[in-house]
Image: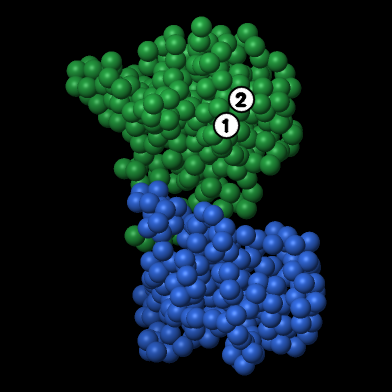
Chain colours: A blue, B green
């Protein structure tokens, strides 16, 4: 019988983390930002059908970067989790906090137990009745979870983009300003312009009744960005 | 609760059937025992749907009965299923409402997972499966008979589906009505239905039919002028699902009643 090689736990964790980071670094970033009327999510995505941003439940949205098949699987599982909870209790009992924790647990378990970690970073965002009740959670490939206010970035160029956002973010943005700002932040991250047609943008709009999530179509988006340009 | 990465598929109904079957509205009663030996659960009665110029109109009275007793004067039997479909239910109130709730989650769940809305035909078929699953309970008297009506965006028209207790699904051309007063309402609809009616004409006919049902059938409630309870009416058109304003319904009901006065 072959004797398995001994690998020190910290070495193994390091190797897995490096592997996951490499995978994630290849992909584009996503920005989530609070604005007056809710929370907006802005991503660069050349595909019109393979989405990175999605609705989970009434007030909750999801965004993922990294390996598509992996975060898509997480997205679907999140919808099942939320719908099951809403069905067995009530719609008001579905919160992002428990969902984010459940994600953290399942991603963390895969990181420690499986040979290959998930090459993903995800966001779980929830729009509250008041801006103070907004929730933004970021969950990394190893299951580590953090909560954020104002703005947050996931993906390859996260450091550069966060710096851009930190320097310029205001908490009184309108929706069109926030989307334009998100686009500029993504451009700053990769150092080149992004075509409007490759943007994927969605909002959790506090003013909408029931399901707050709305994905913008290309014409809607063009109009919003034109409005933002006129304003500035 | 945990996140389950092992389940696949886009149906919420299948998801709970396989993974959480305790949540399914299912009734296991030993053979030979019927509910009547304990108590009759509340029953909802007359529901109807009809096509008009812009789409479909769905309506129901507001009464639920427990044998010869009135269980509720203001029960709701017409529900929005999603933006382009409405479900009305007749039968044992508890299982009916459970089925509506499950059906609503089913449609939203599919839409979120797939990024596309089910075709009206797909919704009708899914509902048929749910009615069929209820057959054992139906043998015990817990019958659920829905009507599904919606606007078919691909065909640009309103469509009506009726069901039997075995989950049989049939499309109706112009109108349909079921429940204890269903036959009475259907008679009125049959007599006065014309294709391409306006919203106002359709509304008048629908309320007239319910009024006739309430006069002929003890289990169907008429407009309750004292308490201000009127039938509920929903429409589905190209612009989506909406409720007809209660004020308008009240006015038409009062007009119909005054026409019958002599």
Do the residues under discs 2 and 1 have CB atoms within 8 angstroms?
Answer: yes
Residue of label 2:
B203
* Image coords of residue B225 (percent x, y): 43, 25
**Would residue B127 be found to the left or right of residue A113 on screen?**
right
**Dividing the picture into quarters, in which one does residue A184 lie?**
bottom right
Dividing the image into 4 quarters, which one contains the N terminus of chain B? bottom left
| A146 vs A47, nearest the viewer | A146
Name the residue at 44% across, 66% down.
A96
Q: Which mark is residue B90?
A: none
- B106 or A210, nearer to the observer: A210
Q: Secondary structure at mark 2?
A: helix
| Position of residue A77 measured from the top left corner of the image (x, y, whole percent) | 48, 59
Question: Where residue B248 is drawn, which disc sits there?
Answer: 1
Q: Is residue B97 above or below residue B171?
A: below
Chain for numbered disc 1: B
Which of label 2 and label 1 is nearer to you? 1
Q: Is residue A92 left or right of residue A150?
A: left
Label 2 packing within 10 angstroms: few (<14), some (14-19), many (20+): many
Viewer-closest of B237 and B16: B237
The residue sitting at 59% across, 75% down in the picture is A35
Residue closest to the eye, B147 or B190: B190
- Tell me if I can see residue A210 in this picture: yes
């Amino acid at each position: 019988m072959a004797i398995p090689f001994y690998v020190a736990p910290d070495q193994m964790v390091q190797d897995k983390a490096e592997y996951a980071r490499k995978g994630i670094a290849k992909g584009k970033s996503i920005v989530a930002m609070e604005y007056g009327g809710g929370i907006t999510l802005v991503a660069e995505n050349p595909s019109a059908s393979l989405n990175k941003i999605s609705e989970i439940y009434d007030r909750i949205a999801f965004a993922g970067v990294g390996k598509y098949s992996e975060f898509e699987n997480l997205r679907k599982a999140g919808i099942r989790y939320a719908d099951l909870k809403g069905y067995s209790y009530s719609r008001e009992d579905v919160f992002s906090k428990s969902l984010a924790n459940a994600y953290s647990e399942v991603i963390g378990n895969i990181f420690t137990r499986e040979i290959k970690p998930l090459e993903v970073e995800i966001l779980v965002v929830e729009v509250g009745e008041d801006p103070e009740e907004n929730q933004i959670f970021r969950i990394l490939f190893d299951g580590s979870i953090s909560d954020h206010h104002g703005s947050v970035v996931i993906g390859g160029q996260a450091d550069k983009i966060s710096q851009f956002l930190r320097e310029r973010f205001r908490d009184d943005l309108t929706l069109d300003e926030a989307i334009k700002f998100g686009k500029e932040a993504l451009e700053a991250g990769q150092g080149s312009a992004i075509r409007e047609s490759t943007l994927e943008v969605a909002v959790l709009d506090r003013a909408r009744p029931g399901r707050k999530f709305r994905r913008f179509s290309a014409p809607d988006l063009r109009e919003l960005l034109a409005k933002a340009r006129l304003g500035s | 609760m945990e996140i389950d990465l092992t389940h696949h598929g886009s149906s919420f109904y299948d998801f709970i059937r396989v993974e959480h079957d305790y949540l399914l509205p299912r009734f296991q009663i030993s053979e030979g025992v019927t509910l009547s030996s304990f108590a009759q659960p509340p029953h909802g009665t007359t529901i109807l749907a009809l096509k008009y110029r812009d789409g479909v109109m769905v309506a129901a009275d507001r009464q639920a009965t427990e044998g010869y007793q009135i269980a509720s004067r203001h029960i709701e039997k017409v529900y929005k299923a999603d933006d382009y479909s409405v479900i009305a239910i007749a039968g044992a109130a508890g299982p009916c409402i459970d089925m509506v709730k499950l059906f609503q989650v089913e449609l939203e769940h599919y839409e979120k997972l797939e990024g596309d809305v089910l075709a009206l035909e797909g919704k009708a078929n899914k509902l048929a499966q749910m009615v069929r699953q209820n057959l054992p309970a139906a043998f015990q008297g817990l019958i659920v008979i829905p009507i599904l009506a919606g606007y078919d965006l691909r065909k640009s028209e309103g469509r009506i589906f009726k069901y039997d207790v075995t989950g049989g699904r049939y499309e109706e051309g112009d109108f349909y009505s079921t429940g204890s007063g269903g036959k009475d309402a259907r008679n009125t609809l049959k007599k006065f239905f014309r294709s391409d009616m306006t919203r106002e004409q359709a509304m008048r006919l629908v309320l007239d039919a319910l009024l006739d049902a309430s006069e002929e059938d003890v289990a169907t409630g008429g407009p309750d002028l004292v308490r201000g309870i009127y039938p509920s009416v929903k429409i589905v058109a190209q612009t989506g699902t909406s409720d007809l304003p209660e004020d308008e319904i009240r006015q038409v009901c009062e007009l119909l009643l005054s026409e019958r006065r002599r």
